[in-house]
Amino acid sequence: MNALVQVPANGHEFRQSTDAAGFCRDIVQQTAKPIQGRRFVSCEGWQAIAIAHGCAAGARDVERVEGGVRAIGEVRRMSDGQVIATAEGFVGEDEAVWFGGKMRKWKWGQRRGEKVWYDEDMPKRPDYAIRAMAQTRAISRACRSAFAHVVVMIDAGLSTTPAEEVPDGGFVDAQYDEVRDDTRRDAGNGTERPQQSRRRADPDEGMPAAAWAELVQLIEAVNADTGKMLKHFGVADLKQLSSDQHREAVAKLKDELAAMAKAETNRNADIGEDSIPY
């Protein structure tokens, strides 16, 4: 695994994050938002992670810009006020749920597995609500840029995409089972009856979003060298990994994450009281 991963030299921050993950695990998991079978960290969860690191997150400079409303989020250390991360939050005019308009939705049809799509007219939200959402997204995004690795330590099944950025229906999976309604003639009585057939997506369409999110989280957590990973698996894009290759990569990255945590714990245990300068 050492051929795939570059281990950070400074372990103090990693130990701090390990401790923080334990402090805020419950609130992060309890406030995570489930969407289409996946769980996304909410703003409350991101703020809890920031507080556990001795930081505070906030938003500033909310303004109307071309295409929507923008805000700037930032994370500051409470000890000295130093800004350690900034990010932009944006609510676009193309988001019907906020600015109004037709929104594409689906509901279950009469047949098993059938999705029926329809357009729903959405009203425009009040301006204060739009501005508030821009700030919320900015705060979550700033926290994510600083503390995404902590989410993986808490639960590798959590997505580091801020919950407020995810549509209610979730993101479209690139790899899927396509349901087709085929009309078949019953050989017994000659009547026609609908049947469903499934087509497995072509591998070139990419790995499922949940699998990709898990891989990205682990890569970020251990600061993996993606160039070496591409060479090791013989692919041009990590999204082209087969299911077996994905399992191998995830297993090795998790092993490396555990090894990093163990090494840091042992290093701190070896420090004697006489070595502590206070």
Image (cartoon, rainbow, N blue to C red):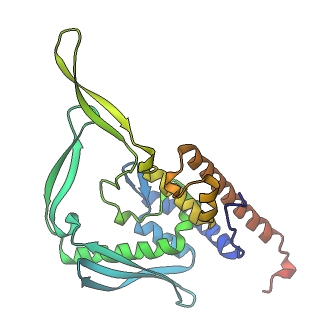
- Vertical placement of 109 versus 253: above or below? above
Coordinates of residue 220 in the picture (x, y in percent): 57, 66
Question: Residue at image x 30%, y 36%?
Answer: 179
- Vertical placement of 246 versus 63: above or below? above
Front in this rendered view, residue 188 or 130? 188
Question: Residue at image x 85%, y 75%?
Answer: 272
How many marks are shown on the rendered structure?
0
Answer with the quarter of the image where residue 12 lies: bottom right
| Residue 31 visible, this orientation | yes
Coordinates of residue 169 in the picture (x, y in percent): 30, 53
| Residue 22 visible, this orientation | no
Coordinates of residue 92 in the picture (x, y in percent): 25, 72
Front in this rendered view, residue 237 or 218? 237
Coordinates of residue 278 in the picture (x, y in percent): 78, 86
In the image, is 146 to the left or to the right of 92?
right
Answer with the quarter of the image where residue 86 lies: bottom left
Q: Among all residues in the image, which is located at the extreme top?
A: 188
- Vertical placement of 73 versus 197: above or below? below
In the image, is 198 to the left or to the right of 52?
left
Question: Residue at image x 42%, y 72%?
Answer: 140
- Vertical placement of 179 versus 106: above or below? above
In the image, is 219 to the left or to the right of 142?
right
**Which quadrant is home to the N terminus?**
bottom right
Answer with the quarter of the image where residue 14 lies: bottom right
Front in this rendered view, residue 217 or 185? 185
